[in-house]
Amino acid sequence: MIEITGINLRRFAKKVYDLSPKTDKKDTHETLSDTMMGVVLQSGGLKGWKKYALDMKVVGGRECSMTVFESEEGRWFIQDLWFGHSQEQLKTLLDYCGVKADIKQN
């Protein structure tokens, strides 16, 4: 897991969206609108036994596949592999948010 506590979650979600591949759906949007962002940021709750701060599956026709887990202490974490994305895309996302992490190269 990679700790991302303290990042701007709105900025993070927009970059996740920008880096994510388009699905075959015709409702693909070029940018994550403020309306869609409001829905994404309000999607928190319980996922299995872990609380999450952000859960992006397919958003606006893009395969985002990103979940931000929140620990009981309020710290945020993401998986160290980003399904459907390259390790370079994960590095780009973390660099954009100012998170230093040792990203494993395939």
Image: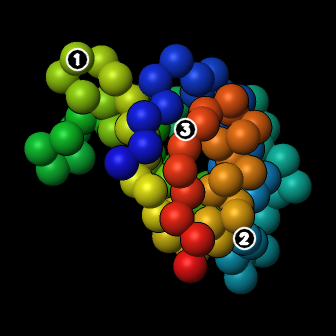
- Specify the color scheme: rainbow
Residue to which mark 1 is pinned: 73
Which residue is painted at 34% across and 23% down in the image? Answer: 75
Q: Which of 98 and 72 is in front in this view?
A: 98
Q: Gap in Å between the C-alphas at discs 3 and 2? A: 17 Å
Q: Which of marks 1 and 2 is nearer the N terminus?
A: 2
Q: Nearer the viewer, mark 1 or mark 2?
A: 1
Q: State the image coordinates of residue 53 (x, y, percent, origin top left).
A: 40, 31
- The secondary element bearing badge 3 is classed as helix
Q: Which residue lies furthest to the left in this view?
A: 49
Residue to which mark 2 is pinned: 21
Q: Which of marks 3 and 2 is in front?
A: 2
Cβ atoms at labels 3 and 2 below 8 Å apart = no
Q: State the image coordinates of residue 4 (x, y, percent, origin top left).
A: 49, 31
User: Is the C terminus in the top left, top right, bottom left or bottom right quadrant?
Assistant: bottom right
Residue to which mark 3 is pinned: 40
Q: Nearer the viewer, mark 3 or mark 1?
A: 1
Q: Which of 1 and 62 is in front in this view?
A: 1
Q: Which of marks 3 and 2 is nearer the N terminus?
A: 2
Quarter where residue 36 is shown = top right
- The secondary element bearing badge 1 is classed as loop
